[in-house]
Image (cartoon, grey):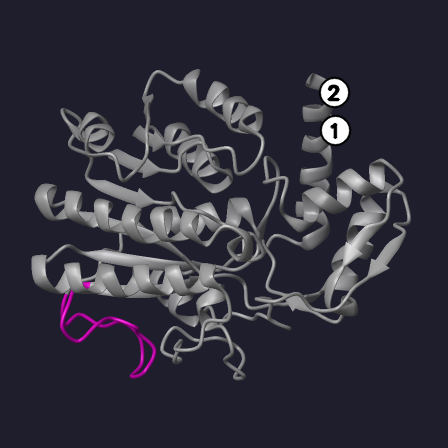
């Protein structure tokens, strides 16, 4: 099949595109290659993808009509996966405008393009951050998500709402999938695992927020990609719910649903750090710091809907995933 992937030079976009190409699909990408983090890492990912004859991409922003037209004209992709976004909870405190432009204006541009071109399935990346101040765990797709605690989360929740209205008005089958702390090789330098490994290797202290009392539903990137690929063939249909009553998040008025992609097995931050120490063979010096604005104490997914739809949930053991990252990090740093 033909796929259109926005944010194709990003961490998740790269892994998804590589998997789709390996499976025999054609991938057309769009990426602005912004300087939020080192563009050299994005270029290295694109170098890997460019080796495949079924891959092509356009350099441009979602908000640029010419770039969007260049990416889509003559390609007619059936499945669209919208991953491009301004990521990061803490950076949203420093540069809120970039989140509005990328996550709202950019998402609306994708929705307008989908309205005009009618893909078979539009898939949009959201985040567990939309659950915000919810006290109930695990987080279920049907739980309220009215209380985002970061601008990042607010823009992603708004993107979900926009996509629902487009699905209702223009009959575009749409799945929004919520990520839970994704990690793995080729990860972003602003992510915790990258920072931990980099500083441990330099014998520098790591910053441990929330005094180490936080927990996260860590999701290995290959498991996330497995979930996206499996969901691609599960385009929502109005009136066709799955599973027992109350499980499906399918809209009553649109071919639209939201799905958690996570294993539902949260891990404490200190246990995560211990896994990094074990794999690197070094003990980290730790700066114990208070919770940061926009952070939440714990995340935990209810993966029941994902299991009902595709028959599997993420299950890569933490230490396996951490080792894969550490091995990649060593190779990448030596190659630079």
Q: How many marks?
A: 2
Look at the image and tell me whether residue 213 can be seen: yes
| Image coords of residue 86 (percent x, y) | 44, 47
Marks 2/1 in contact by CB < 8 Å: the verdict is yes
Q: Seen in the image, is 4 located left or right of residue 226?
A: left
| Label 1 SS | helix
- Reply above or below: 51 against 214: above
Q: Seen in the image, is 288 located left or right of residue 231?
A: right
Q: Residue at x 40, y 18 (%)?
A: 52
- Reply above or below: 142 against 34: below
Query: Majority secondary structure of the magenta segment?
Result: loop
Q: Seen in the image, is 198 located left or right of residue 111?
A: right
Q: Seen in the image, is 22 located left or right of residue 257?
A: right
Mark 2 Cα within 10 Å, few/some/many (few <14, many 20+)?
A: few
Q: Which residues are magenta?
A: 238-255
Quarter-wise, where is residue 78 in the image?
top left
Q: Quick check: is 251 in the magenta stretch?
A: yes
Question: Dot 1 corresponds to which residue?
Answer: 330
Q: Residue at x 44, y 23 (%)?
A: 49
Look at the image and tell me whether residue 312 can be seen: no
Q: Residue at x 59, y 40 (%)?
A: 188
Question: Dot 2 corresponds to which residue?
Answer: 334
Mark 1 Cα within 10 Å, few/some/many (few <14, many 20+)?
A: few
Q: Nearer the viewer, residue 57 or 279?
A: 57
| Label 2 SS | helix
| Image coords of residue 196 (percent x, y) | 76, 46
Report, in whole angstroms, how far the alpha carbon at label 2 lies from the one at label 1. Answer: 6 Å
Q: Quick check: is 275 in the magenta stretch?
A: no
Quarter-wise, where is residue 293 in the image?
bottom right
Q: Residue at x 27, y 35 (%)?
A: 3
| Image coords of residue 9 (percent x, y) | 45, 31
| Image coords of residue 309 (percent x, y) | 34, 63
């Amino acid at each position: 099949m033909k796929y259109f992937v926005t944010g194709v030079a990003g961490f998740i976009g790269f892994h998804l595109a590589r998997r789709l190409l390996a499976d025999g699909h054609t991938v057309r990408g769009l990426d602005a290659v912004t300087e939020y983090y080192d563009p050299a890492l994005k270029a290295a990912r694109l170098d890997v993808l460019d080796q495949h004859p079924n891959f092509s991409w356009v350099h441009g922003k979602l908000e640029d009509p010419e770039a969007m037209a260049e990416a889509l004209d003559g390609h007619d992709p059936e499945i669209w996966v919208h991953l491009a976004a301004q990521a990061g909870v803490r950076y949203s405190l420093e540069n809120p405008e970039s989140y509005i432009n990328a996550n709202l204006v950019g998402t609306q541009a994708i929705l307008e393009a989908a309205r005009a071109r009618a893909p078979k399935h539009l898939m949009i990346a959201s985040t567990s951050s939309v659950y915000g101040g919810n006290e109930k765990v695990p987080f279920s797709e049907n739980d309220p998500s009215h209380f985002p605690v970061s601008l990042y989360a607010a823009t992603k929740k708004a993107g979900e709402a926009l996509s629902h209205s487009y699905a209702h008005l223009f009959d575009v089958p749409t799945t929004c999938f919520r990520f839970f702390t994704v990690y793995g090789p080729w990860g972003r330098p602003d992510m915790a695992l990258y920072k931990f490994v980099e500083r441990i290797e330099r014998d520098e202290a790591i910053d441990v927020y929330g005094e180490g009392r936080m927990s996260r539903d860590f999701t290995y990137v290959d498991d996330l990609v497995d979930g996206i690929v499996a969901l691609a063939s599960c385009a929502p249909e109005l009136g066709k719910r799955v599973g027992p009553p109350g499980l499906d998040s399918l809209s009553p008025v649109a071919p639209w649903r939201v799905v958690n992609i996570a294993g539902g097995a949260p891990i404490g931050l200190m246990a995560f750090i211990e896994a990094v120490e074990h794999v690197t063979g070094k003990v980290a010096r730790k700066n114990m710091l208070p919770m940061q604005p926009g952070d939440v104490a714990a995340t935990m997914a209810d993966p029941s809907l994902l299991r009902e739809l595709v028959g599997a949930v993420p299950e890569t053991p933490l230490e396996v995933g951490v080792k894969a990252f550490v091995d990649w990090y060593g190779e990448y740093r030596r190659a630079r």
